[in-house]
Image (cartoon, rainbow, N blue to C red):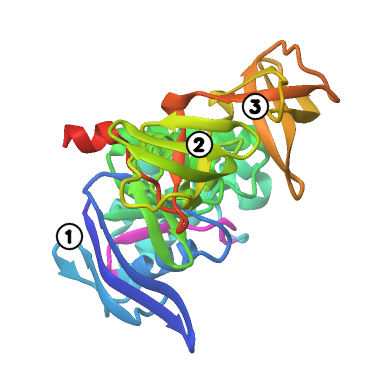
């Protein structure tokens, strides 16, 4: 196991700047997940750690060792790829032993490590099979075993479950979580699936345009997003957003006017903003209540999704086709074509300024 430190890390491909001044520290034994939209740089950042791409600027340390110029085989990392990358003509045993043989490990040590890894991953009965005789989940476990058998200091996963069907992804997610708990390895995991991120991670790193938007626990990112981008990216269904304007700052927070709802007194600190400043109000679907339509607070229900234990109600926000989502336990009394008033839970409202930064809560400032 080892810690990882990135200091002002940069990566450019020609004139295209992909990774921009990334600072990050990953503790020994942590499970850290990189998330973000396509093209945000998460896989590139993983490849920089693995040594599969050269670093354009900054420092990368594994433990106390600067590894900028070290080749992949000397960094002590193991990588599991999205495509499995198994050798089809080799058995499971041979695939898992391949890296050890390249490192000139003794035959007995190879045999011991492969069998121990196979035992952990429940692959002992499959060691004589070739990849074509395995299921998708079994192939992914073999790919994991090949990385683990080398006993790397850091395990890297590049969207390892994206080729699996939904039920198998859930199963493999649980296996990866149990494996990390058992081994205590330092893990960096790249995914576009935020459910994987929320269920696996000790810490989530949200990337946007090659920069880090926020680092924190799943709970912290969900409950206290630092920017509108993080608020909209973390959570399924996504956070609802409504345009708002600042009317007054006062000792306990601020008063804002929210499109379609009216004026609300909120605990956010808007002291540094001018009156009528443009804001955005954010509210999670489970914190958005519906009531009888009244006056201007009337939103048309355009769809109702029944999901068994819960219901999603979609409302037309009048924002160019953008819909608001209300989530509640089933059954729901709301139907398509009805109109409802929006009543956000004021203790769970988020406010973002014109640059997309979250306004802090007054009680957070006072407690400090």
Check residue 80 for magenta coloring.
yes
Frontmost of labels 1 and 3 is: 3
Residue drawn at (35%, 76%), measured in percent from left and top? Answer: 10
Can you identify the residue that label 1 sits on? 63
Report, in whole angstroms, how far the alpha carbon at label 2 lies from the one at label 3: 28 Å
Read off the magenta span.
74-87
| Residue 199, visible in the rendered structure | yes
Mark closer to the observer (2, 3): 3
Dot 1 and dot 3 residues touching (CB under 8 Å): no
Q: Are marks 2 and 3 in contact (CB under 8 Å)?
A: no
Query: Measured along the vertical axis of the image, is residue 247 above or below residue 2?
Result: above
Q: Position of residue 24 (x, y in %)?
A: 28, 59
Q: Quadrant of residue 31?
A: top left
Would you place residue 170 above or below residue 280 in this image?
Answer: above
Percent position of residue 261, x then y: 61, 31
Q: Residues within 10 Å of mark 1 (few under 14, many from 20)?
A: some
Q: Name which residue lies at 66% across and 32% down.
A: 325
Dividing the picture into quarters, in which one does residue 70 lie?
Answer: bottom left
Q: Which residue is mark 3?
A: 326
**For marks 2 and 3 on the same chain, the one whose residue lies earlier in the sequence:** 2
Q: Secondary structure at mark 3?
A: strand
Quarter holding residue 137: top right
Determine the CA span between mark 1 and mark 3.
46 Å
Instruction: Quickly name the residue at label 2.
Output: 173
Which mark is first along the chain, 1 or 2?
Answer: 1
Q: Is residue 112 visible?
A: no
Q: Which residue ends up furthest to the left in the rendered image? A: 64
Magenta stretch secondary structure, dominant: loop
């Amino acid at each position: 196991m080892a810690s990882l430190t990135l200091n002002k890390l940069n990566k450019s491909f020609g004139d295209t700047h992909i990774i921009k001044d990334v600072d990050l520290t990953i503790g020994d034994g942590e499970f850290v997940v990189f998330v973000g939209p396509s093209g945000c740089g998460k896989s590139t950042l993983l490849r920089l750690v693995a040594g599969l791409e050269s670093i354009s600027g900054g420092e990368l340390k594994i433990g106390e060792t600067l590894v900028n110029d070290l080749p992949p085989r000397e960094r002590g990392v193991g990588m599991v790829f999205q495509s499995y990358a198994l050798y089809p003509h080799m058995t499971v045993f041979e695939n898992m032993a391949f890296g050890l043989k390249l490192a000139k490990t003794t035959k007995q040590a190879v045999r011991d490590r492969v069998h121990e890894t196979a035992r952990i991953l429940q692959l002992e009965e499959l060691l004589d099979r070739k990849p074509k005789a395995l299921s998708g989940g079994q192939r992914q476990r073999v790919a994991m075993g090949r990385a683990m058998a080398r006993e790397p200091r850091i395990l890297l996963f590049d969207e390892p479950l994206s080729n699996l069907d939904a039920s198998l992804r859930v199963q493999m997610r649980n296996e990866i979580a149990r494996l990390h708990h058992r081994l205590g390895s330092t893990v960096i995991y790249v995914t576009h699936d935020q459910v994987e991120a929320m269920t696996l991670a000790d810490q989530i790193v949200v990337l946007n345009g090659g920069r880090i938007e926020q680092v924190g626990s799943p709970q912290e990112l969900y409950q206290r997003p630092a920017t509108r981008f993080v608020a909209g990216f973390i959570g399924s269904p996504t956070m609802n957003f409504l345009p708002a304007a600042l009317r007054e700052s006062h000792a306990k927070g601020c008063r804002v006017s929210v499109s379609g709802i009216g004026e609300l007194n909120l605990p956010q600190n808007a002291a540094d903003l001018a009156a009528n400043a443009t804001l955005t109000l954010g509210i999670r679907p489970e914190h958005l209540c519906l009531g009888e339509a009244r006056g201007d607070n009337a939103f048309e229900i355009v769809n109702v999704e029944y999901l068994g234990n819960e219901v999603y109600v979609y409302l037309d926000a009048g924002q160019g086709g953008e819909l608001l989502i209300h989530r509640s336990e089933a059954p729901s009394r709301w139907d398509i074509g009805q109109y409802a008033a929006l009543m956000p839970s004021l203790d769970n409202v988020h406010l973002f300024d014109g640059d997309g930064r979250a306004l802090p809560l007054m009680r957070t400032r006072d407690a400090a």
